[in-house]
Amino acid sequence: MAESSSVTKSSRSGGPQTDEGKKIASQNALKTGAYSNTLILPGEDESQFRQIEDQFVRDFHPEDMAEIAMVRDLAVLAWKKIRLENLELRFTLARLNAPLDYFDKKDTQYLSSHKVESNLHRLSSYTGEIKNEAELAKAYAERFQVKGATIEELEGLEKSHPLIHKKLVEYIDHYGFTNPIAKNVLHYEIENDDGEAELFWNYFLKIAIEDLNQMIWFCDNRSQIEQELQVVKDKRLMELMQNERPSRAFDDLRRNFYRTLSELRKHQEWKRKMQVVDVASRNVVDSGEDSASE
């Protein structure tokens, strides 16, 4: 009887016996699984999935094939949930930041203006500090219109009024002037919108003052424009939230995850009970052997 029990016990003791050996074996089984080459999509980082997988192994210490399979399933479900969250984030941001359409602009005071729509990308730059700088630059440009500018003033323009200087450089590049030193810039002639010859400097000052006025207007009305824009984004977000498909997918993944987790815990609890029974059986056998020898 004792001999038979010993043979049965030996036949069930294959594979690694130490905790470290079992851990290594479980990791090997996971990393060489059938899904290893098909789970990671193009553009995804396989090392991130491996980190998740390894963490589940550290958390649950799978020791047999059933546990290995369930821990693998947990890692895959967690990875798919992260993928779906990233997908939803990208889709949501793309929708929120998409160009305004007719219905977005309908019945709005500011967004319906082409001037506003074309400047939304730089809205955050219209600060109180920029407004003060623009007002000083505008006053300076208007003074140039009345009394003209000296070569020294033009040469110091970058330091004294960088907003005007930046716009001046853009227009000089646009017209492709050669040797654009201060003296020449004051005497260049162009053909204006009416087809008449006009001093470039005078024409530029008119354009610069218009641009500075627009900049000041945007600074004054930035908060109202942002409020209208936020209303549009809120409406878009509500439309996205009413779409049940991503929500159903999340729910399915969540249910599958916790169902698998419950199955894993039940299996591990069952194994612990079986180990207790096995130990108790061996103690009974050992006790009987001791009695027989006495």
Image (cartoon, rainbow, N blue to C red):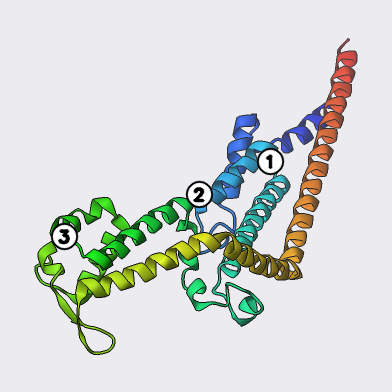
> Residue, x 83% and y 43% (percent of image)?
266
> Residue, x 48% and y 65% (percent of image)?
217
- Residue 43 in sight in this render: no
Q: Regarding mark 2 in the picture, which secondary structure is present there?
A: helix
Dot in front, 3 or 2: 3
Relative to 44, 173 lies left or right: left
Residue 287: quarter of image: top right
Return the disc, 1 or 3, that comes first in the chain's sequence: 1
Relative to 282, does residue 63 appear above or below in the rendering?
A: below
Identify residue type, mark 2: Ser
- Residue to which mark 1 is pinned: 62
Q: Regarding mark 3 in the picture, which secondary structure is present there?
A: loop
Q: CA distance from mark 1 to mark 3?
A: 83 Å
Q: How far across and how far down the image is residue 36, in percent?
A: 55, 57
Dot in front, 2 or 1: 2
- Residue to which mark 3 is pinned: 150
Q: How far across and how far down the image is residue 102, in percent?
A: 61, 82
Identify residue type, mark 3: Thr
Q: Regarding mark 1 in the picture, which secondary structure is present there?
A: loop
Return the disc, 3 or 2, that comes first in the chain's sequence: 2
- Residue to which mark 2 is pinned: 47
Disc 1 crowd, CA 10 A, few/some/many (<14, 14-19, 20+): many
Disc 2 crowd, CA 10 A, few/some/many (<14, 14-19, 20+): few
Residue 200: quarter of image: bottom left
Q: How far across and how far down the image is residue 255, in percent?
A: 79, 56
Q: CA distance from mark 2 to mark 1?
A: 21 Å
Q: Nearer the viewer, residue 138 or 83?
A: 138
Q: Nearer the viewer, residue 158 or 264?
A: 158
Q: Nearer the viewer, residue 51 or 127?
A: 127
Q: Quadrant of the N terminus?
A: top right
Q: Quadrant of the C terminus?
A: top right
